[in-house]
Image: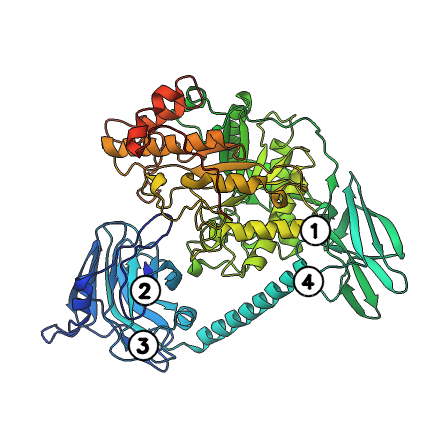
Amino acid sequence: MRIFCAEKGFGNKGLKGKGKAVARLGGVLLAGLLFAACQKDVPPVPEPEPDPTPDPVTVEYLRPNTTTAHQMKISQTGQELYQIVTEGEDPYVYTQALSKANPADSVVLTFEYRSSQGVDFLQVFLCAPVTEERSNRTKALEATSEWKTWSYNLYFSIRDCAWGRAGDYLRLDFGNRAGISLDIRNLRLRGMTAEEKKEVEQQEYEEQRDQAMETRLKDYLSRDYPEAGITSVQVGGDQVAVQGYCPAGQTYALAEIPPYQDVTESSEFPFATPVSSGTFSATLDRWVERGGMLYDRVLSKWAVVLLEGEKETLASHARYADQVGALSELPPLELSSKKGLGGFHINPVVGDLDELGITSVTVNILPTQQMFLSPQANAVAHRYGGKTYYFSESFVQETDERLALLQEKNIVVAAILLIPPASAHQDPSVGALMQHPSFDPSVGAAHYTMPNLTTPESVNCYAAALDFLATRYGSDQSTHGKIHKWILHNEVDCGRDWTNMGNKPVTVYTDTYLKSMRMCYHIVRQYDARAEVMISLTHSWTHESAQGYSSRNILNLLNAFCRREGDFRWGVAYHPYPQDLNNPRTWEDSEALFSMSTPYVTFKNLEVLDRWSKQPENLYKGTQKRSVWLSENGTNSRTYQQKDLEEQAAGFAYAWKKIKALEGIDGIQWHNWVDNRQEEGLRIGLRKFPDEPDDPYGAKPVWYLYRAAGTAQEEEAFEPYLAVIGLSDWDIVQENIAQ
């Protein structure tokens, strides 16, 4: 269920989510807001069982405005009692407007409900306007045959939205499934319990702490340290060699900063080695025992600190390893074409790899989901950091099968590494280590978590999972398959949905994400000196969604950290879906501008991403273009009617002509390969649903166009789609890109 916070007035502009527009209300809603809530002939119902914690201070009842129901039926069946039956994938209803200002302490949304099926989530919008920025995606309503109390604290949303004036109202979205029946009663806002107040105080403390860290990180990135610095970090098989400089006249030390330590917050550096003034060099053991574990210092960065009695002060930027000794020094496997597939898996149409001329794929891997800390039956053991970890044999076999097939065909593979929430791990102890402590499903869909890198145990657990994959699939000597590129997590600019660590300031968030990138990089480069890590981003270039940040802002921060802490081989895995994912006519995207400050980068204006990839400040060490993959993207066919299928194919034709011409774009990995019923109604595959009646896995027109792309048949196959787009030729690349 989704809840919206609204002020007076209703807008007409649709919402942008992942291309999904949220319907707005017209005169029906305005009329409904004036409708009387209480009906004299409604029979009374028994009083509900009391809340486990009684309503403190205030209770303000809310009443659904039944005339505003969308894709649901709602009827009043008793006093403060309603029955709801959902009828579509976007079922919602507005409440009646507040007749008076909501008391300041009345912030906890509460009701009793019963439902044999349950609701996956409730989204609450504080209206108006109705926007994702003014919403909370809350916890599920679990199935229950008995009355059960559901509560959610809206304190922060009410505060941030300045909601609660007379005339304000809510929108309640009950999941995204049709056919759900539930009864709700006593819908109300109440005051907080003592425990809830304590939780709010803790969150406010964390907000202040995060903001302080944001300020420190920005200062760290903008500050110069002219007197001291680290100039080189070389990691060999069993030693780390660090070189740097510091002035005479004071006492300095070389400090090691592991991932679980914040370089900007530390007032003492427990892992420090005295150094002489002037230029210095230090050679240290690579593996050290800490807390009963062996820790690999390849994961650390190194800085100069000033020692003044008991006081220790950062005196330089930190620097990561410049070079890690690798087992393999072979030249990189180059893409032989720009055509790829996203989310590859074994299925009945795997012959498409050959028929479509596929040269690259992405593969989703959840490395810790089936990882265990203790011995298991049917498990593959892996030794790391003085400890043995175990991986489900079925997970390993399934991954082997996919990657070995791709290796046989010399297809370049990018693994997308996803860390599920603790509840989705088979070993709860691994889940507890891997879920970020700030993971918060109330701020977004929270499909996956940012890995927890805040403790030595969590760092070693994550490193062990990465090392297992790198050992098995990273080397050219592997007989199980080969991973060439490593995409860290999913759509990190939409982090609250796809790489969740709560609601963090952008520099704090990026700092943690960068630690995950660096850890993966320094582990996999030991097995393949060509290996590259990639950042996954949505089409939101300068637009900041309610679920996160802008892609350009995060890219700028990556560059800023690299300038201060040493550059490394990272690339971009971009998702330039059409502005509205439902609409394949991407050439009409109104907010995809030919400007470096465009809100969105979609298929329409790929020239922006191409230009970005060639700008000097974005090159690896200022000299080499970073890899740019369009690793998840496609155009939609709204239905399987001929017109919709033609528009989907036309969208690809338009995109391909740009991709083919733009040197900065290395390839496209089409997503989905096959239509997926879990994609919120989208049909973006090259083939129809696997269970489509009469035509399972049926090849759509876009499949035939994809096959022709890059071949001698391309021009003939593409020509009919010029008329669909309204073009006379394919001379569509824009040369003039505004700053």
**Real-space CA distance between mark 3 and mark 2, rounded to the nearest whole angstrom:** 14 Å
Mark positioned earlier in the residue sequence (3 or 2): 2
Do the residues under discs 1 and 3 have CB atoms within 8 angstroms?
no
Mark positioned earlier in the residue sequence (3 or 4): 3
Residue located beneath label 3 in the image: 165
Q: Position of residue 369 (x, y in %)?
A: 51, 44
Residue located beneath label 4 in the image: 264
Task: Say if residue 640 shows up in the picture.
Answer: no
Mark positioned earlier in the residue sequence (1 or 2): 2
**Real-space CA distance between mark 3 and mark 4, rounded to the nearest whole angstrom:** 42 Å
**Real-space CA distance between mark 2 and mark 4, rounded to the nearest whole angstrom:** 39 Å
Q: Secondary structure at mark 4?
A: loop
Q: Secondary structure at mark 2?
A: loop
Do the residues under discs 3 and 2 have CB atoms within 8 angstroms?
no
Do the residues under discs 2 and 4 have CB atoms within 8 angstroms?
no
Residue 166 placement: quadrant = bottom left
Residue type (three-letter) at the residue carrying disc 1: Glu
Other-residue count near label 1 (Cα within 10 Å), few / some / many at <14 / 14–19 / ≥20: many
Q: Secondary structure at mark 1?
A: helix
Residue type (three-letter) at the residue carrying disc 3: Arg
676 horizontally vs 62: left or right: right
Mark positioned earlier in the residue sequence (4 or 1): 4
Residue located beneath label 1 in the image: 565
Residue at point 42% right, 61% down? 442
Residue located beneath label 2 in the image: 129
Q: Quadrant of the N terminus?
A: bottom left
